[in-house]
Image (cartoon, rainbow, N blue to C red):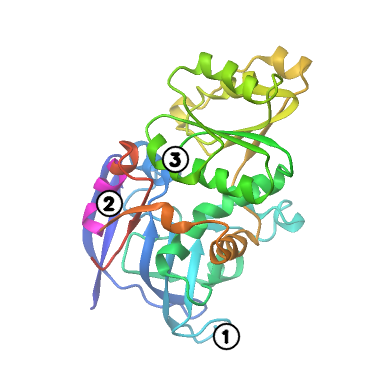
Amino acid sequence: MALMKAAVFKDIGRIETEGRPIPACPDDGVLIKIYACGICGGDVRNYHNGLKGGIKNQIMGHEIAGQIVKTGENVTRFQPGDRVALAPDVSCGECWYCKRGMVNLCSSHKMLGTHFPGGYAQYIALPGEVLSHGFIEPIPEGMSYDHAAFAETASAVIACQDYNNVSLGDRVVIIGDGPVGCLHVEVARARGASKIILLGREKLELARAFHPDHLIDNSNPGEVVQKVRELCGGIGADIVICAVPTVAIQQQAIDMVRKRGRVVIYGGVPKKNEISSLNSNSIHYNEIMVLGAFSYPSTGLSDALCAIASGKITADKYLTAKVSLEDVAKGMEMIENGGALKVLIDPWL
């Protein structure tokens, strides 16, 4: 039996590399040879807090690019040799949300890397359920696997700003200097924002490469609020996007947004610290909208691939490190300590 290498989540704080049988190609699915898989901030959070539902002994990873090596006998949409990018969400197609096009809010939402084996491996088999209700898109001609794997990260950022209608003349504040924060800078610029302010701490020097109009150290949040309001004509920002996995900065966002402005809570936080305390009078009297942003619509991955292919998103600037399957935990440490912006896994190193 042919084996592949895989980095397997065993338990909280424990990922082990092991040999596993190369999965069989389902009759209604495809078998993909993986050439690149990104380490997501959500993966790091799950590594420390556990997978949803207490799932263990699972291959994590959902920012995937590879080449189809085999198709099931009932598959006509793809053929061996096709280069494809994957994203994690798998919807049911039948619930109230799916029938209204809100597949990201599916009542029976599943994910590659949690409910299905993911991309921290040399191969992945996708059953028909994923082909029908998940995300698998052709990689544009000339695009590398590394860039294609990064498209999943960009998908939700593009969808967030589309949903919140970031547009010409907007003054946008992004709290968070990781890859998602930097993506928000590029997408806001492409959408015509007049002023882009990025607040961060650990990765400020890496974020400088994306040229926000103002790059501010957020180590002293109280002083930063006043500075941001002054930079935004004294009234505050039109929209503030919280792009870090912590509730602590959400009140800061309320304090620096203008009346009738928007505060967007982007990205999940650890379940052990998920309750936020916000000044309800500020929200009430200033008519501030506080919104969540999660995942993306059915066109999300395709939109991101197009944005990278067109140069609106400069993928090379984000991809600052690459690790083997044996070094997944080290890659996560690099993300946490600020040593890298985006870390990719090459399963064949």
Numbered range of the magenta stretch? 324-333
Relative to 250, residue 155 above or below: below
Res. 218 mark: none
Amino acid type at mark 1: Thr
Labels 2 and 3 touching (C-beta < 8 A):
no
Mark 3 vs 1, N-terminal side: 1
Dot 2 falls on a residue whose secondary structure is helix
Labels 3 and 1 touching (C-beta < 8 A):
no
Res. 76 mark: 1
Amino acid type at mark 2: Val
Residue hosting label 3: 208
Magenta run includes residue 331: yes
Q: Is residue 113 visible?
A: no
Amino acid type at mark 3: Arg
Labels 2 and 1 touching (C-beta < 8 A):
no
Between the C-alphas of marks 2 and 3, the distance is 26 Å
Q: Main secondary structure of the magenta part?
A: helix
Residue at left offset 63%, top offset 45%: 188
Residue hosting label 2: 328
Relative to 343, residue 27 above or below: below
Q: Position of residue 282 (x, y in %)?
A: 70, 15
Side of 162 relative to 253 (left or right): right
Viewer-proximal residue, 197 or 104?
197
Q: Nearer the viewer, mark 3 or mark 1?
A: 3
Q: Position of residue 306 (x, y in %)?
A: 59, 65
